[in-house]
Amino acid sequence: MSPQPKPGARPSGAIRAILSLIAGTAVVVPAFVVATAPPPAVARARKAVPPRRVVPPTVLPAVEPVELVDLSPDEARAYNADVPFARGANPAARPFRLRDAPEDLARATDCLAAAMLYEAGADPVGQKAVAQVVLNRVRHPAFPKTVCGVVFEGQDRRTGCQFTFTCDGALTRWQPPAALWTRARTLAAAALAGTVYRPVGYATHYHTDWVVPYWQSSLDKIAGVGTHLFFRWAGWWGTPPAFNRQVQASEPVIAKLAPFSDAHKTGAAVEEAKAAMSTADLVTALTAGTPAAAAPGEPDSFLVVLPAGAQPESFPQLAQAVCGTRDHCKYLGWTDAKSLPKSGAPDPTQLAAMAFSYLRDRPAGLERTLWNCTLYPRTRPGGCMKRQPVPAPTPAPTSAVIAPVAKGPAELGGVRRGAPAPTPNPNP
């Protein structure tokens, strides 16, 4: 039998060590939990933000609207600081060189300059970062194929626009001073000529550090420039091979830029006319005269002279204004009034001179716009009219006197005809 400890004796050293460890753990563990626990706002944001989702290469990622988590600026900054930067390389984007026609290049330059100014203010570094994101989007299959299309995507939907200034009324509240506008256009032109802003890599998204968009959780944070954080899609859609989109050559006209952009004034004139004129007056103004019926018994067919100075990408808008709500409509346009048929259907010579056609058959689900790509060679592929052969002139009548047959060798057969003229490439 082992001896029993005497009453009042101290515990052994081993027991004292165990008791000390238990007591220390009871103090240290709660303190560690308290010290490492995220602030309440960060924890709340983590619950509000959707779980991370990596889209497979076979599925095109959706471009989500800009919706923000309900956090104060300080809470958002705390959350954003808690999000780590992605590990691994952040390669610079390939140079972007836009080789459009002069009028399209001018429109692209002004759209890009507007995004740079309204998104980054007068900060040239921030402007370069914004420009790089826009050009990255133009190359990515998830976004529109033009610079203006990217910048003004969703402009008609208050919660759907991708760049807030395009739908929150900023363009009507403030217009850039001439000097600031000129500097922004210079930086935009450099970006469209191949200048790369390397720090943001292939970023397609950004936001200021005092907000948290819901889309953030499925993207990788790759750079910070000033108060802006830059992101790219997680997985394959954020890698250089994903940025393989062919850019469209024809830039749309943006009427909202017309007050300070000469390149976009054509679109503004049409929009102002829509707002100020009745439908009948608008038809008259857009077609330089009352449209004539293409043929007797065809009230839904129109032959028109296209307005002088109108850009070819505005022709569908003109046609839709003339056709109105008709289920069936045919709109044929010429740039030369002399080629316009006076009555009846166009003859082959007039068809060859036609500049634009619009056909609508809603019951059949048909709506087609075609351009004369001989006149407008940079129209998108698939939008060119079938080339109409110009008929040869009718030979002058000859005398009824039969000329004597000249003696000599018989006419040689199998004469080689000249090769047909190549069809112009609609998108060189």
Image: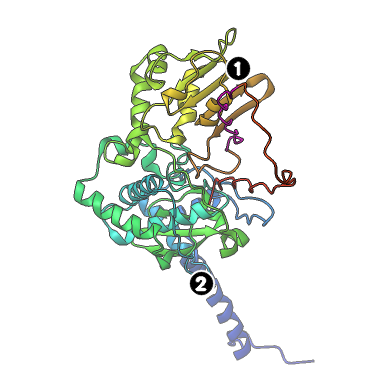
Residue 93, image x, y percentages: 48, 65
* Mark 1 element type: strand
* Residue 410 in sight from this viewpoint: yes
Give, as a single range, the part of the protein colored magenta: 384-399
| Marking on residue 399 | none
Question: What residue appears at the point 34 percent right and 50 percent down from the top-left corner?
Answer: 119
Q: Which residue is mark 2?
A: 27
Residue nearest the observer in this picture, 84 or 318: 318
Image quadrant of residue 392? top right
Q: Which residue is mark 1?
A: 328
Question: What residue appears at the point 53 percent right and 52 percent down from the top-left corner?
Answer: 428
* Residue 8 in sight from this viewpoint: no
From this view, report whether residue 205 is shown above or below residue 6: above
Three-letter code, disc 2: Val
Residue 280, image x, y percentages: 41, 12
In the image, taking residue 220 as reference, residue 59 lies left or right, namely right
Question: What residue appears at the point 52 percent right and 51 percent down from the top-left corner?
Answer: 247
Q: Main secondary structure of the magenta part?
A: loop
